[in-house]
Amino acid sequence: MSGRARLTLCSAAATLLASCALLPLVTPATWLLQAAFLLAIQSGVGAATRRVPLARPLTVAAQALVTLALLTLLFAREQALVGLIPGPEAFRHFGDLLQTGTDDVSRYAIPAPLSDGIRLMVIGGVLVIGLAVDTLAVTYRNAAPAGLPLLALYSVAAGLSEGVTDWLWFLVAAAGYLMLLLAEGRERLSQWGRVFGGAPRGPGEQPGPVAPVRTGRRIGMAALGVALVVPLLPLPAIQGGLLDGAGTGVGAGNGSGGTISAVNPLVSLRDSLNVDEDRTVLTLRTTTSNLSDMYLRIVSLDDFDGTTWKPAKRHIVAVPDEFPSPTGLGQDVKRTEVTTRIAAAAGYGQDWLPMPYPPSSVQIKGNWRYEPVGMTLVGDHGQKTSGKTYQVTSLDVQPTAEQLASAPEAPGSVKSTYTKVPDSLPAVVARQAREITEGATSDYEKAVALQDYFAVTGGFEYDTEVEVGSGPGAIARFLKDKQGFCVHFSFAMAAMARTLGIPARVAVGFAPGSPQADGSVAVGLKDAHAWPELYFEGVGWTRFEPTPTRGSTPTYTLPDSSGSAVPDLPQATRSADAAPSTEPSASTSCSAQDKKLEGCAAALPLDPTEQDGGGTPWYEVAGWTLLGTAALALPLLPMLWRLRRRSVRLASAQHSASSPAGAPPGGRKNSGGRQPGDPAPAVLLDVPPQEAGEAAVGQVLAVWRELTDTAWDYGIEPDDALTPRRAAARIVRIAELDETVGRSVHRVAGAVEQVLFAPEPRAESGLADDVRKVREALREGVGWTTRVRAVVAPRSAIRAVWDLNDRWTALKASWAARLATLVRRPSGQQGQQQGG
């Protein structure tokens, strides 16, 4: 094995060993086999392009394009052209998978399940690191800096893992890096040809360590020290939560077992409620006349594991122009349409978009995605709410107590999903829920009894200083101590409702804010809130308020809540820009006349830029398609170029054989049969082009070049210093060709000598057939790997690069001559100036 091949193998092995540090984070470990296979292909492409050889940037580009094609085949083949060429849909699918993977990484406890998003992140990350290591260590021959990407890969894994076997993965990664350093040192020493050592230490003592080895040891020890220290440094942790004013929407959970939760509203809500100085994070203007129901919902937590509530894994799609009707909402329930403009403060960075529920449409600029089940919007590719102004059209659903009491049983799919409770939930929760709702005859009556128990009759106290608590016993402790804040109340009521068979989830967002003198509503950090939502067929998800002194009690849960039996006409299909009712109200943001005159635009303007249009522009689709086609075609260019060149050369030979022999009129001048890119006869055999002669010279030389290039493709490098006769004998000897094929080789070589040196050159017939016989014999005499390479990555394709370089040199010389002609001073004018 050559030194370069050994270094390539060690580079891939070092990346694979460092990626083993990710094994404790994800289960099952089948992703490692896939990553190893793709890494082998990536390294093989690099080795092949370096053998051609290509320029270093082209080698890296070829590896990157092949890596993209492999990831497309593995993760987005249904969205790609012929399963390999990525287009707009494929890249959009990659973005969706990465977003899902990011959510899953922060949502699940270690080890996380191997979802498609996580699999793309780990395999794609390993391939990116592998490309960086291969580029530094092999392509650019500098293995020491290659330890940095390996260190980054290990540090990410070590920073997330909390296992006791981290030292083992460190040793594995370190062994891979040292193996890479030693392979590079050995490869360099083999090129130097002489190993030099240190001076003897004394009589009879062995010489000191070899200098490169000593340097490698120092580098290795330094890298090991950095790798040991970096995981211990106080690196930035993932902090914040759903309501964090500058958060990322991802919280660092503190549940039992050291789990990492995507949403930790216990911590983020308490921090928001306990701020020393309330800070306005949202300002809104709305057309509703009932501000007490203007809750701004961020996200719903519907997955309860006994420790905390969190959003279930959902598929997100593009934001539709009009949202579908809310799940479970019937036509006979009264509802009115509300238009609300919301402006987020510049310091309020949030992944999820606060909106009234249920929304019908949203106008907002930026990269946002829609989650259909929860009817929420989530930022895509790092999109945040900071400084955003947006408009939401929503429904103010107003069910009556009678409608809720007479609601039929929820569908099986809803009930099975939203009534799950873990076995770890203390039995006291279900037992106390049955005691509280004893005597209730419907789910509605049970829900009202639970709400009243927490908010009125149960003796609970609202206290934001209460410790969050964790583990399955947190709810039981809250029921015993009867102190807590909104999260405790909403979590406890939702869990109790589920034990009673009532579908329930928890919503997180903001309670109604404070009206301002200018008609707007200010929502501050202390308005952060959580509340339970219970499902009733015919009404849908319905808000309840169990937290005392917080929010507003829904009117449909009050004893005299009879409401109106005549519902308004559904208005969910109206445009988001439809004018609100002309009836004035104290809390309406602006009158119909002001809205008509655009008087409200200055208060809360939408983003001045145009809103996203529907669909992808044709030119963008065409651009991505061309880019994907180029990504697939680039690795195939050597093969395509070689096939075309062979076809042209052999076709010229056929044409030469069918033409009359003899010199053309006008003397011994080349007829131009030599194809573009073939070297002139002077290049081949140091014969001036003027002496080459006859019309058949170019065609015969093209056939000879095709024969030697074919031999080169199958491993026999050309030697232009030899005469055609000796070059032919060399090909026959190395390839061990039989007598018949050998005669074909010598026949072509004899034709070359004849057209170059004979007094009257003439073309031989059948030379193209001779080349085809030689090519078939060469193909049968080698292994399948050489056959594949001769077709896919032919060595002689490097002539295309040489041709381009020659043409570029000639073009520069031509332009330099023209420029010299333009600026050269005529000799007559020069003489006149000297005479004057």
Image (cartoon, rainbow, N blue to C red):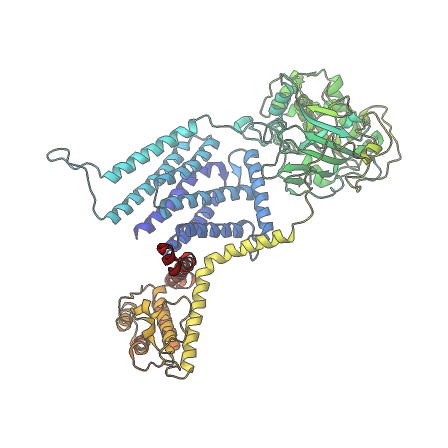
x and y, in percent, of residue 202 in the image: 12, 33
At 63% from the left and 24% from the top, the residue drawn is: 269
Question: Does the image show residue 167?
Answer: yes
Above or below: residue 559 compared with residue 13 = above
Give residue 733's quadrant in the image.
bottom left
Above or below: residue 702 compared with residue 208 = below
x and y, in percent, of residue 460 in the image: 70, 16
Total of numbered circles in the picture?
0
Say left or right for 72 vs 554: left
Residue found farthest to the left = 203
Say left or right for 792 vs 554: left
Give residue 504's quadrant in the image.
top right
x and y, in percent, of residue 217 in the image: 29, 36
Say left or right for 336 vs 749: right
Quadrant the C terminus occupies: bottom left
Give residue 422's quadrant in the image.
top right
> Nearest the camera: 368 or 15?
368
x and y, in percent, of residue 300 in the image: 67, 33
Question: Does the image show residue 500?
Answer: no
> Nearest the camera: 636 or 487?
636
At 34% from the left and 51% from the top, the residue drawn is: 5
Residue found farthest to the front = 836
